[in-house]
Image (cartoon, helix red, strand yellow):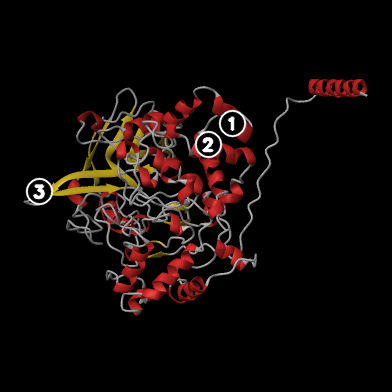
Amino acid sequence: MKKTFGVLVLFFLFIACHKADIVEPIVEENPELSLAVPADFPEMNTSVAQNKPTKFGVALGEKLFNEKRFSVANTISCGSCHQKENAFADHHPKGVGVYDRVGLRNAPPVQNMAFMKFYNWDGNVLQLEKQPLVPIITHEEMNSSIVEVISKISAGGEYQKLFKKAFGDINITPDRIYRSIAQYEYTLISANSKYDKVKRNEGEVFTETEKRGYQAFLNKCATCHSTGLFTDQSFRNVGFPLNPSTEEAGRSRVTGIPSDYRSFRVPSLRNAEFTAPYGSFGQFAALIDVLNYFDNGVLDADNLDPILKANGNRIPLTETEKHDIISFIKTLSDEDFVGR
Amino acid sequence: MISNIRLVKADGTEFPYHVNDLDKGATVVNQAKPQTLDYVLSNIPAGAYKQIKFGLGIKRELNTLDQVKFPKFYVATGANDTKMMWEWGTGYRFTKLEGFYEADNKEMSIHTGSTIEGTAGAYTQGVDAYREIVLDLTTNAVVGRKVPKITIYADFDKLLSGKTNTLTLKTGTGMGDNATPNIHTADQMVKFVDNLGGDGTSDIKGMFAISNVEN
């Protein structure tokens, strides 16, 4: 019996060798990954269709995302500020780059990017593929250049293999770096929180506090923090304390529209539990501080959001409501996503 | 920052000078470096030229900080004494004026650059700070056995007292404050752009004028 089995194996090996002689060198298949659209999420950014995530594109992107040689001193990767356990954000008020240089704004979480129309606090980037170069060259972030990055990661030959698997040949190009990082980020979808499970009737139920919090949220927060992303992706001046930097103008830095002055993209509330501090430059240490601020009254401005203006520049909230809303926001925490 | 140079012959035909190659056809004119005030155009076809056109800034298609395609220009603009890159806009700074103003020497820092997104005719957001300058030569520049020299005068008085806008510098962090350290809003920036480079319609000269053509 044993002998017969051995003969069979040999026979197959022979066939395999024979085939290899006549066909092209084997290229490992690199299947496209399908991205599911969670319930109530908006349509995908049209750029995703131009850069569909593939198995090896995403794997390469993840490795590059965590590549510290992107920074001039080999100390900072994308993942240094965008930490998985914090929903790909961090706990610094403002981004901290090479040599502890401090940037202008709070590092935003990298989640559900495939479904967003605008990136960054001021929406200057509309295509995710155009973002990776910005931190690479910015003085307060990585302070490097794309040619320097390519030169560093080309050493050793390891990356060439990964680029070949992802893109078909060993060439390491800027475009492929940007595309693979974006592919990886497109796969970072968070839609498996308690809230999602409740909505999908998967057996989980809200506690009484969470239920009241959800109602209060719908009444007082959901106009801006809408859809399954918990942001309507609009830019609003909500009268938060002002960044003292004279570089900061919010959305109007990009658009040149006066009514966009000091307006910022409404942030998603998903995984907010993990992304303190809050605000465009980390003005608020905790969620309760944000709610207290809205309750006490915000800074006035010509272009203050009309909803706030109509309500005396505040969102009145009782102490119970604040407590309940925070309980509800915590149901948006996705433990699977952050790996906790 | 000057690019997209075109020389117009007496018969109206245009000679584009490396208009799609920033390494060969674009330059940073830096008042702090006198050697950058002269820019030599080589291999120009012989003939008489009546007009010069150029871009103040970089046209949208090339304004991407492409270090691989244009390594020389990337180095020239990223150099520590120049810093003509606008990192967050992933484009170049088109003009940069830094100094002090008024008796108490308040800081002034005016940078211009584009934030435009989308394709021509269908821009989705942002402002276009690139301007096309068209200057008629005072007399035809004759390229042949001799090398003509065109002197272009840039009048920085136009920064505040331009054809399009009359501006007053203001320090602060408010919407209208326009002096430090960068202009806060693209809205304020465009007023300077229109003064320096013209508004693209009624003014296509901005601060520039031909002061002399030497054959």
Mark 3–mark 2 Cα distance, whole angstroms, equals 50 Å
Residue on which disc 3 sits: B105
Q: Position of residue A154 (x, y in %)?
A: 50, 25
Q: Residues within 10 Å of mark 1 (few under 14, many from 20)?
A: many
Q: Chain of mark 3?
A: B
Residue on which disc 2 sits: A63
Q: Position of residue A89 (x, y in %)?
A: 43, 50
Frontmost residue, B48 versus B117: B117
Numbered disc 3: secondary structure: loop
Vertical side of B156 occupied by A192: above or below: below
Mark 1–mark 3 Cα distance, whole angstroms, equals 56 Å
Frontmost residue, A13 versus B155: A13
- Disc 3 marks a residue whose amino acid type is Asn
Of badges 3 and 2, nearer the viewer stands 2
Q: Chain of mark 2?
A: A
Residue on which disc 1 sits: A162
- Disc 1 marks a residue whose amino acid type is Leu
Q: Is residue A142 left or right of residue A175?
A: left
Q: Position of residue A307 (x, y in %)?
A: 38, 75
Identify the residue at image location x=22%, y=43%.
B154
Question: Residue B11's image quarter?
Answer: top left
Vertical side of B80 occupied by A8: above or below: above
Does label 1 lie on the same chain as label 2?
A: yes
